[in-house]
Image (tube, grey):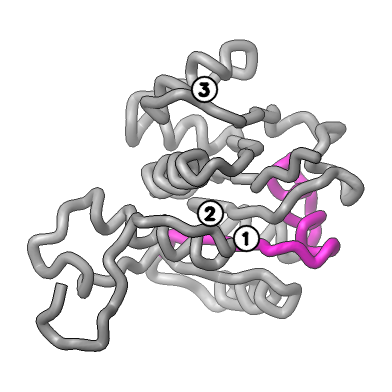
Amino acid sequence: MREPWIIGVSGASGTPYAKAVIGALLDAGESVDLVVSRAARLTLLDETGATIRDAHWKDDVAAWLGRDLGDLTYWPAGDLAAGPSSGSYPARGMAVVPASTAACAGIAIGLSKDLLQRAAEVNLKERRRTVVVPRETPVTRSHLEHLIALVDAGAVVLPASPGFYGSGADATAQQLIDFIAGKVLDSLGVEHTLMRRWSGQIGER
């Protein structure tokens, strides 16, 4: 039985994180269900020039990722009757990357504004691994309260705050992106080689 990881891309800046996570999951032979919010489409266009249209999603997503799609299924964000909206739909878990403050708030209070929020709520209620990657700074009290509510509901809150110990002061943007993507996969329990791990020895790479 197919049991995909659901990847939700919300409207926060940081769509390259989503690309790295999806690519690593596919490289690991995992199945992926993709949900891109309406706001995320605008951010994706602004950050990468990529366009994702529901009617042409295969070509558009392949162009954005720059690779073969493997076992990837796309669900329109407005389709609240889609598979991931139900707890009976077999899924291994979900990552919302990047996670806007609006998406975090909607998931925390069970708003189910769109499929992304609904799928995340379903994964939490079914006690599946759920990771949210907020990329906002500074944060307000309400932002923090929503993140605490997500932690209390069982989610892993994984801010997009890369470490530099794996690549040093001369780290490339891609290395920093891969660090966060690697931490997401660690939280999902999926093996990867995206980042260099801390060895316990200062100066060792």
Q: Amino acid at mark 3?
A: Ile
**Secondary structure type for disc 3:** loop
User: Can residue 11 be spotted in the picture?
Assistant: no
| Mark with earlier residue (3, 2) | 3
Say whether residue 113 is magenta.
yes
Q: Nearer the viewer, residue 185 or 144?
A: 185
Q: Position of 196 compared to 137: left or right?
A: left
Instruction: Quadrant for the C terminus, please.
Output: bottom left
Per the image, the residue denoted by label 2 is 100
Indicate whether 145 appears above or below 175.
below
Report if the CB atoms under discs 3 and 2 are less than 8 Å apart.
no
Which residue matches tag 3?
A: 52
Indicate the amino acid at tag 1: Cys
Mark nearer the N terminus (1 vs 3): 3
Along the viewing direction, whichever of 187 and 77 lies nearer the viewer: 187
The percent position of residue 141, horizontal first and vertical second, equals: 55, 78
Q: Which residues are magenta?
A: 109-136
Residue at 60%, 45% in the rendered image: 7
Q: Give the numbered dot on residue 104.
A: 1
Q: Residues within 10 Å of mark 3 (few under 14, many from 20)?
A: many
Q: Is residue 185 above or below residue 199?
A: above
Mark 1 neighbour density, 10 Å: few (under 14) some (14–19) many (20 or more):
many
